Image (cartoon, helix red, strand yellow):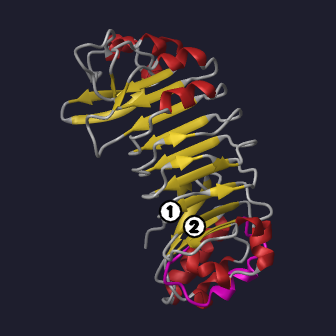
Amino acid sequence: MEIKVRNDDFFNNSKTIEIYNSYEPYYLYEMKRFYENNNIECIVALDTDLDIYLKHFSNVKFVYLNSNAVHLEEVNKLSNLNGIALCNNQLKEIDDKILEKIEYLEIDYLEKKHIDFNQFKSLKHLRLKNYPFEEFKIDIELISLSIDTAPKIKKLNCINTKSLIKLKLENITKLETIDLECTKLELFDIYDSKKITNLEEFLKSCKNLTEITITSYSDLKAVLNSIGFINNLKRLEYFSTNFKIMDGDLKPLLKLKDAHICRFYKNYNLKDKDLPHLKVFIKEGNKISYGELDSLEVGKEDPRISWLD
């Protein structure tokens, strides 16, 4: 058997393994031993019957639950639990004492049922999937918020952003305005949410941004009027987009440490080679790798670099 370790980007970049075939004593023994010997903090509980195996990972900090999991009461025995990913119909099985102390929560809405987020008294990081309502409100001071797929939301304006550092929005296809004051926001990532009329104005107001990613793969005609707002963001280091920049002016990117323009157009006033890059695509024969620019002896003059324009 092969046990693969990954770093989980939501649960504090924790070392993570998948638990599967735990019904087989040999598999369970090997996974338990690997877990104990490799400082694993997070498990993806793929098997449905938690009663069989969860007790063997009793000090786990983070857990992803199978949507069909049974014996959810076993979760209540995890004394060190600090984060959980589950479906909203599973919440009723989790003890209030667990919900009050966790800092990380991922909810997949399998049912159209509202959640009272006030019960999560220690919550700092929230990720929502398949959010079915027209409005999202939360008064808790989150550090990070991610909303993945919310087909009815048209406006974001009822979120406590006093401590918000990371905001990720994906597949919010009807979102038209972001009316938030994000004075501490450092990372903004938006994907396939291309109808926002005030996106550039919103970004301009987020003075502490260090990273911005704006992408769409469902509409190759998505546009930004300008990236001039970058000139107002003194701390910005990274910018990436595949939107067409209508005024063609890429010069604001020259102040950054790293920039990725995924598609180039004739009206652009700079080439890919002109932009700041930490990593570049390197082509050797039929192989293309993604490597550090500083590792190349002649830097941008290396003929193996595959530029995007």
Q: Is residue 5 left or right of residue 63?
A: left
Residue 47, image x and y in percent?
A: 49, 82
Classify residue 285 by image quadrant. top left
User: Which segment is the magenta one?
Assistant: 64-82
The number of numbered discs placed on residues in the rendered structure image is 2
1 or 2: tag closer to the N-terminus: 2
Image quarter in which the C terminus is found: top left
Task: Specify the quadrant that holds the N terminus.
Answer: bottom left
Q: Residue 244, located in which quarter of the rendered image?
A: top left
From where the camera sits, is residue 80 visible?
A: no
The residue tagged 2 is 107
In this picture, residue 33 sits left or right of residue 299: right
Quick check: 298 above or below 123?
above
Q: Is mark 2 on a helix, strand or loop?
A: strand
Pointer 2 local density, CA inside 10 Å: few below 14, some 14–19, many at least 20: many
Judged left or right of residue 273, residue 64 is right
> Pointer 1: residues within 10 angstroms few (<14), some, or many (20+)?
some
Cα gap from disc 1 to disc 2, whole angstroms:
6 Å
Residue located at (54% from left, 46% from top):
168
Marking on residue 129: 1
Residue at 50%, 63% in the rendered image = 131
Verify whether residue 170 appears in magenta: no
Foreground of the two, 32 or 200: 200
Residue 128 visible (yes or no): yes
- Specify the amino acid type for callout 1: Lys
Coordinates of residue 271 in the picture (x, y in percent): 31, 13
Specify the label residue 30 is tagged with.
none
Q: Is mark 1 on a helix, strand or loop?
A: strand
Up-down: is 207 above or below 136?
A: above
Rendering coords of residue 265 (x, y %):
24, 20
Q: Which amino acid does label 2 sit on?
A: Ile
Which is nearer the eye, 135 or 248?
Answer: 135
